[in-house]
Amino acid sequence: MFSNKKAIQVLLPVYNCETYIRECILSIINQSFINFELIILDDCSTDNTFEIIKNCADVDERIKIIRNPSNLGIIVSRNKLIQLATADLVAFMDGDDICHPDRLKLQYNFLQANLNIAAVGSSYTILGESSLEYKLPTIHQDIMAHMFIDNAMCNPSVMVRLNELRQHSIECDINYRGAADYDMWLRLGAVCQLANLSQTLLYYRRHCEQESTSNRSRQQLAHLRVLEKLYVENSMPYDNELLAYLIWPGCQNLTYRTLINLGKYVNSLSESQNECTKFNSDLFKHLADIRYRGVCRRHKIKGLISYIATRGISGLLAGKFFGLVFAKDCIFSRG
C-alpha cells in the first residue's frame, strides 16, 4: 500500500478534527519538498473528518488513508503508524496544526547533512491572537537539560530516522498517556542525538478539545511520572509536590515554609548535578533557578526573602543587573 521510494512519510493520526483537518493537509501537500507520502490514520471519527480526508486524497495521490475499526486513541494510533511506516525518515504531525511550507525540506536537508542526529524538531508558534513563538534549544545537551523540567521536542514538529526508533524499540508508551511523546523523546535522547532547528516550522493550535487542554490534570500527573523515572535514573532527588510548584507556579499562595523548602530543593537539584556530563548541567541549574525566581516573584516580599534565605546573596547577584530587576519585581509587584 505504501511506497518504498518516498524519502519521507508524514504520519498523521486524526480524530474528530473536521474544523482544522483540511488546512492541516493543505499545509503538507503544498510543501516545497515533494518527495513524500502522507499517511493519515482516522481513529473512527464521528464527524466529517473522514469525508474531508477522502476528498483530499482524491486530488493528491501522495495521500494514503487507513481507518481504525474502532476508536483506539492517539497513542495506539501513532504507534500503528510508526509500525506501518517504510520510509527512512518519518515526520510527525497532528490534525489541528499547520506546517511551514519549507518544513520538510529544511528538516530533510538537516538530517542528510548531520548523520549523527536521530531526530530534529523545530521552534513553533502558538496559533491565536497573541501568536506566541516558542524558541526551543537546538543542540542535544541543551535539549536534554531542558528535558529535566519540560519537554523540549515539540512532537508534531519532529522528523526522525525510522531505523533509530526500531533499533531501540522506541514508541509511545500508553502508560504515560498525556505525556507519552515527552517520554518517547527522552528515551530516544538517552541513546541518540536530538536537535531542533531554530526556525518556526510549525504553527501549533490550542483549543478546548485537546488532551493538553481538556485533561490538564492527567497530563501534569503523567509529566511528573516521566520526571520521576528520569530523576531516579540520574540519582537526582525527586519531590512530587515541590517539583510541581517549580514547573507550574500558577497562582498558588504558598506559605513561607513551602517557599523555603522549594529553595532548598532547587539547591539539592543543583548539587546533584555538579559531576554530571550527560547533559548541560549548568544550563539545568540556570533553568531551575529561573523557575524558582518565577515562583518567588509571584509572592512579592515573602518570595524575595525566601530566595535570599535559600539561594544566598551570591545567587541574587547572579541575576540580571546583579539581581536588581528580580528584587524590584518582588518589592513593587502588584500581581
Image (spheres, rainbow, N blue to C red):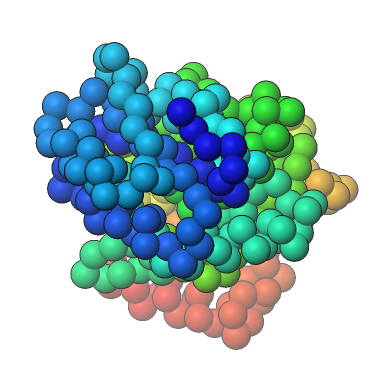
Q: Which residue lies at the image location 81% right of the left edge and 46% below the top edge?
A: 278
Seen from the viewer's position, the closer of residues 96 and 59 is 59
* Left or right: 196, with 268 as reference point: left
Q: Is residue 144 visible?
A: no
Q: Does residue 119 lie above or below 108 as drawn?
A: above
Q: Is residue 10 left or right of residue 113?
A: left
In this rendering, is residue 169 above or below 326? above
Q: Is residue 8 visible?
A: yes
Q: Quadrant of residue 113?
A: bottom right
Question: Of residues 288 and 190, which is closer to you in this image?
Answer: 190
Residue 14 place in picture, x, y as percent: 30, 35
Residue at horizontal 38%, vertical 36%? 64
- Which x, y percent locates residue 188? 68, 37
Give coordinates of residue 73: x percent, y percent: 34, 23
Q: Is residue 142 left or right of residue 206?
A: right
Residue at the top extreme of this rendering:
69
